[in-house]
Image (spheres, grey):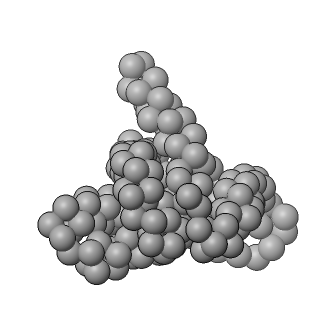
Amino acid sequence: MENSVEKKYNKWIVVLSVAIPLVVALLFGVNLRKLGYDVQPLSFLPPIYATINGITAVLLVAAVWAIKNGKRSLHENLMKVAIACSVAFLAMYVAYHMTSDSTKFGGEGAIRYIYYFILVTHILLSVIIIPFVLITYVRALAGSFERHKKIAKITFPMWLYVAVTGVIVYLMIAPYYAH
């Protein structure tokens, strides 16, 4: 049974689950330099936001360890930091793409197909994961821990995949960044 806390947040979950991917997609297509703004490319950001993805992956694994070992407060704090890291990643990712030209992957042969498979699944799951993270968080906030645990078993592997593949995509494309 859904409680009032969950009901209160359901509209926000829907709004954010639609708005975040739309806004990111729109902003991804906006390059401030090409629009005539005198901004420096934020080319230093990719290794930073890739590192944040790696930190997110570590936080997620640590949070699962914490809850399995009865450390609920630690679990809660790790999850809040993981969410903050994901938000920071998203802000930096958008800022980079609004100020810099896109980098083309230069690999050839089988590695090219592997890269694009990882990239496409990473992007698709990064959109799909948004409502899962929000629902999982709200269920914990509402004290619906059985329902939280049920959806967390789905959310965790997807979110971990997105975090880890974010690092892999960066490592695979890094040699092709303009210097």
Percent position of residue 153, x then y: 36, 48
Q: Is residue 43 visible?
A: no
Q: Which residue corresponds to the image point at 48% horizontal and 74% vertical from the top-left?
A: 141
From the top left corner, tell me how far across and down residue 21 is, in percent: 68, 54
Give 35 or 83, whichever is nearer the viewer. Answer: 83
Left or right: residue 172 compared with residue 10: left
Find residue 42 and report its horizontal and vertical position in percent: 57, 70
Quarter of the figure with the N terminus: bottom right
Query: Whole-percent x and y of residue 82?
Result: 40, 69
Q: Residue furthest top?
A: 109
Q: Judge from the rendering whether residue 151 lies leftward or rightward of residue 168; answer left or right.
A: right
* Residue drawn 60% across the image and 74% down it: 5
Q: Residue at x 41, y 45 (%)?
A: 154
Q: Nearer the viewer, residue 83 or 95?
A: 83
Say above or below: 86 vs 71: above
Q: Which quarter of the picture shows residue 6?
A: bottom right
User: Please, is residue 112 above or below residue 80 in the view?
Assistant: above
Query: Does residue 127 show up?
Result: yes
Q: Residue at x 67, y 67 (%)?
A: 7
